[in-house]
Amino acid sequence: MTWKVKAATAVIAMMALAGPAAAEGELNIYNWGDYTSPELIKKFEDTYKVKVTITDYDSNDTALAKVRAGGHGFDIVVPSANYVPIWIKEGLLLEARPDQMENFKNVDERWVNVPWDEGRHYTVPWQWGLSGIGVNSKVYGGDINTSAIFLDPPAELVGKINVEPEMTDVLFATIKYFGGEWCTDDKELLKKVRDKLLEAKPKWLAMDYSVTEKLPAGDYSAVYYWNGAIMRSRLKNPDIKFGYPKEGYPLFMDSVAILKDAKNVDNAKLFMNFIMDPENAALISSFAKYANGIKGSQQFMPADMQTAPELVIPAEFEKAGQFLLACPPEVADLYARIWTDISK
Amino acid sequence: MATAREVSDRAARRDVRDRWLLSAPALIVIFFAAIGPLFVMLAYSFMAKGDYGDVKFGQFSLDGWFSVFLQRDIFDDTITLADAHLSIFWRSVRLSVITTVLTIALGFPTAYFIATRPRHTREIWVFLVTIPFWTNLLIRTFAMQEVIRNEGILNTLLIRLGIIAQPLQIMYTDAAILFGMVYVYLPLMVLPLYASMEKLDFRLVEAGYDLYAGRLQVLRRVIFPLVKPGVIAGSILVFIPSLGAYVIPRVLGGGKNMMLGNLIEMQFGAGRNWPLGAAISITLMAIVMVALLFYVRNTARSGAGHG
């Protein structure tokens, strides 16, 4: 073989490899723990011949801090609604334009023009839900549609409560408990909020995750936690009942975004489009038990999810739910200081 | 012609230069891997905090150090001691001291037992002590959680035996953290204790008895002074990692009972206050330094006393 033939062979070989390489390779997803359906990932891997690696985080701040520090190697991240504007403002997200993708037509109109990503230029809905009350009815039989379960716990539940360690959700429920509005800077009211939390905290057992194991097993008898995890607990232990805090409860939506310094942008875009398919979105929800934002996905979900008390918000409690947007910096700073005060 | 003096001078200079060159790799590693990051921490602790974590470079601020010990009241702006931080400092020091005392109480008889076995079986006992190190700390901590949780092995056993009616709430308490730390750090106490007990001349113990000393007296006046360096070394090995423990309070303390390690982690994560995190880290190091100085002075004194 002359050098020309060799060179030509090499070029052809490279082209042959380069063709499918766009779809083959890796995808590194950075998502909340216990939140990603293994079935969905398996299907994506098989469809596109991509090796997917999932890494967990436990709070929006952890994810933000790690990605900002650089050298993370992640392609996809799933921040909550109130954090998406921060991610965009900090220049961490790629403007992937999911609104121009093939499957975008499936996104429910309700979730297209959202305040955190108007018109969906950066993010795709992953799941949405709320923080509510889960109680083991064998331990306590009273009214559970109130934040009093963890703020003024009945004697039966004292020392058996787990509260999600998420600042905004806990502060929101407490502010609402005293009739305030989110982002209020009314110091008199906030003082009551802080004092109430300081008084309530010794009556809690933990502020931890892993509710899906410990609530059904009886390590916790009551939780203020995300509805999907409480539903998963109920499926393991039918004594678990769900309550909507009538004073006010926070709604959340986590959205899938591509990082600006992602190495596998093409695969990440494939993944975005993939999860907007109703059948695939249904896999997400069937695993974590939260609603998604994709039209027509219900029909692919297990029947018990259509009637689950954790997912179908009763009309009387619908008004109490609210999306939490980021507060102005001075208010956010005030809230962070209250939180530190409580976290000792 | 060079005089003998010049030749020896040159040789001495070359000797000095060679020593510097030979130790250069170690010095570079020490500087970049140990001292360098410390300076970064020190610098960060004097900067203003960024809005979403990180620091504002070049903006000098004492806020980080201020809030280690003091706090401005959220509501009326009065300055008070930061009882949130101080109570975490206090919990860390208290739990570490108790851990050290408990590991001595458990480790001393263990080491004594091993040291008094026939020579050829001692190695087997020491080997047994090191077995827990084969398993990752996180896994051992989760195993401990399985033992002490409400539906765990310990509570189920006690209920089955009819000793208690309701499960004991051990998880998520300081007792759980203590339990975990004593279990994890016990080998670090046993090994140095054994090392100094192995050298103990047991004829001295016999001599003590011959001179009509009681068992307690022999322990206090003969054995303990001789193995004191081992006790102190073990205490340091247990106390320092206890003070900075992160995984054990995180898993067994349930995120409610923080220790210093968790407080520092929180500042770099959800707290978004890197300067404060850096300042607390340096404070933690200062505490460790004080403990080490105490150690050095004590061993120096005991070294002088016993030749």
Image (cartoon, coloured by chain):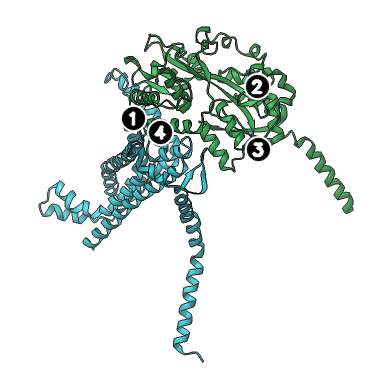
Chain colours: A green, B cyan
Farthest residue, direction bottom: B1
Nearer the camera: disc 1 or disc 3:
3
The earlier-in-sequence mark between 4 and 2 is 2
Viewer-proximal residue among A141 and A40: A141
In contact (CB < 8 Å): disc 4 and disc 2: no
The image quadrant that residue A185 belongs to is top left
Give the Cα distance between marks 4 and 1: 20 Å
Whether discs 4 and 3 lie on one chain: the answer is yes
Few, some or many residues within 10 Å of mark 4 (<14, 14–19, 20+): some
The residue pinned by badge 3 equals A260
Q: Which mark is residue A113?
A: 2
Q: Chain of mark 3?
A: A
The earlier-in-sequence mark between 2 and 3 is 2
Q: Which mark is residue B22?
A: none
Q: Amino acid at mark 2?
A: Asn
Residue A166 in view here: no
**SS category of the residue bearing label 1:** loop
Q: Is residue B170 left or right of residue B226?
A: right
Nearer the camera: disc 2 or disc 3:
2
Give the Cα distance between marks 4 and 3: 32 Å
Q: Amino acid at mark 4?
A: Thr
Nearer the camera: disc 4 or disc 3:
4
Give the Cα distance between marks 2 and 1: 46 Å
The residue pinned by badge 4 equals A340
Q: Which mark is residue B173?
A: 1
Whether discs 2 and 1 lie on one chain: the answer is no
